[in-house]
Image: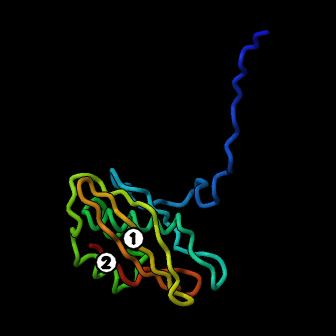
Amino acid sequence: MSTTPRIGVTPTPEPPYDEEQPTSETAPPEIHGTLALDPHPLVWGPPGSIPDERKLRHLGQALAEVLAGRRPPETVADKLTARAYRELVQAGQMIRTSRPPFAGSVHVKEPRDGAVEMCMLVHCGDRNRVLAIRLERRGAQWLCTDFETA
């Protein structure tokens, strides 16, 4: 007794997240070869909630692209404090790579309420780098207050 196999279409497991829905707002200018960064401020839930690691990874990817000279710093200005933004502009190209940087997994710690520190591996072709970022909650928004790379 032989039966022919049936092939069915599997539905998408999850609907798109709210922030992935198309909006009519104007987006920041596109930069070829970079990850699109959400133009909305980094806002996460009620006080005491931990930021979404997916959004943190996107922020880390964008900062790595700025530090590699592949994205203009003004595209992340609204995600940083004024001091951190000045340091980012002054740092210039800190990551030397012939390929676009790629953010790896994110490790997040909460040293105190209202502060989050994350580190991530940034793949840069032959050599990998580490990017550490500190964010502090300012009202309902999280802002990057400091960053380091090695």
Find out whether the residues at labels 1 and 2 contact each other: C-beta distance under 8 Å. Answer: no
Disc ID at residue 76: 1
Residue located farthest toward the right when viewing the structure as drawn: 1
The residues bearing labels 1 and 2 have C-alpha atoms spaced at a distance of: 16 Å
Check disc 1 and report its element: helix, strand or loop: helix
Residue furthest bottom as drawn = 112
Q: Nearer the viewer, mark 1 or mark 2?
A: 2
Q: Where residue 78 appears, x then y in whole percent?
A: 43, 75
Specify the quadrant of the image occupied by residue 121.
Answer: bottom left
Give the amino acid at mark 2.
Glu
Badge 2 marks a residue whose secondary structure is strand
Instruction: From the image, tell me which residue sits under label 2.
Output: 148
Dot 1 alpha-carbon crowd within 10 angstroms: few under 14, some 14 to 19, many 20 or more: many
Of pointers 1 and 2, the one earlier in the residue sequence: 1
Kind of residue at badge 1: Val
Which residue is most to the front? 1
Report the front residue among 123 and 22: 123
Residue at x 52%, y 73% (from the top left corner) = 41
